[in-house]
Amino acid sequence: MRRPVAWIVAVVLFVEALGVVALNWILGTVVDNQQMSLAGLDPDVMSTSSKGAGVVFGLYFVLCGVVALLVALRNRPPAGLGRVLLISAAVVHGLLGAFAWGLMGWPEFLFMILVLALIVLLLMTYDGQGEPESEPAGTTPDGTKGGDGSPLTPPPAPSTP
């Protein structure tokens, strides 16, 4: 059965990647146009750094979105580097949520926590959902073959002395 949470997480992360790139690009352009300086830093360096950081974080969120998309397409839990990426994205959203609460307000905090909850739900929903391995017919739980072909053979009757 397909679970829609992976599709939702993928779309949210792709949209968030575009938003992060756009926001940092706009901030870099504003700094460049106004020739703003913070504690004597060069405005060109600040502008370039803002744009570069936006692109790097955007690519990071796109990569996390690709992992969520692969989870949705394959209908299997993320493994290896993909799982690490999604866990790190959850941690990043938790930290961004804490900063958003303190610096911007509760709507931004709620958005970050919603994305955090979706990523955690994706990780938990697909965790351990593999098919249980069944034992071949005629074997006992310890892997030995039953005498009459049944899965379990009764123990031998005790002998009287």
Image: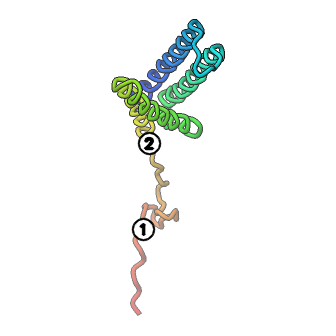
Above or below, 48 relative to 112? above
* Whether residue 101 is situated above or below residue 42 in the rendered picture: below
Which residue appears at 44% of the width and 30% of the height? 99
Q: Residues within 10 Å of mark 1 (few under 14, many from 20)?
A: some
Q: Nearer the viewer, residue 26 or 156?
A: 26
Quick check: 127 left or right of 63?
A: left
Q: Secondary structure at mark 1?
A: loop
Number of other residues with Cα within 10 Å of mark 2, as a class: few under 14, some 14 to 19, many 20 or more? few
Residue type beneath disc 1: Thr
Q: Residue at x 48, y 50 (%)?
A: 133
On screen, residue 152 versus residue 51, left or right, reads: left
Determine the residue located farthest toward the top in the rendered image. Answer: 33
Q: Nearer the viewer, residue 63 or 36?
A: 36
Instruction: Check residue 129 in the rendering and tell me which mark sits there, or answer none.
Output: 2
Dot in front, 2 or 1: 2
Residue at the extreme bottom: 161
- Circle 1 residue: 153
- Element type where label 2 sits in the image: loop
Does residue 13 lie above or below 29 as drawn?
below
Q: Position of residue 61 (x, y in %)?
A: 53, 25
Q: Position of residue 127 (x, y in %)?
A: 45, 42
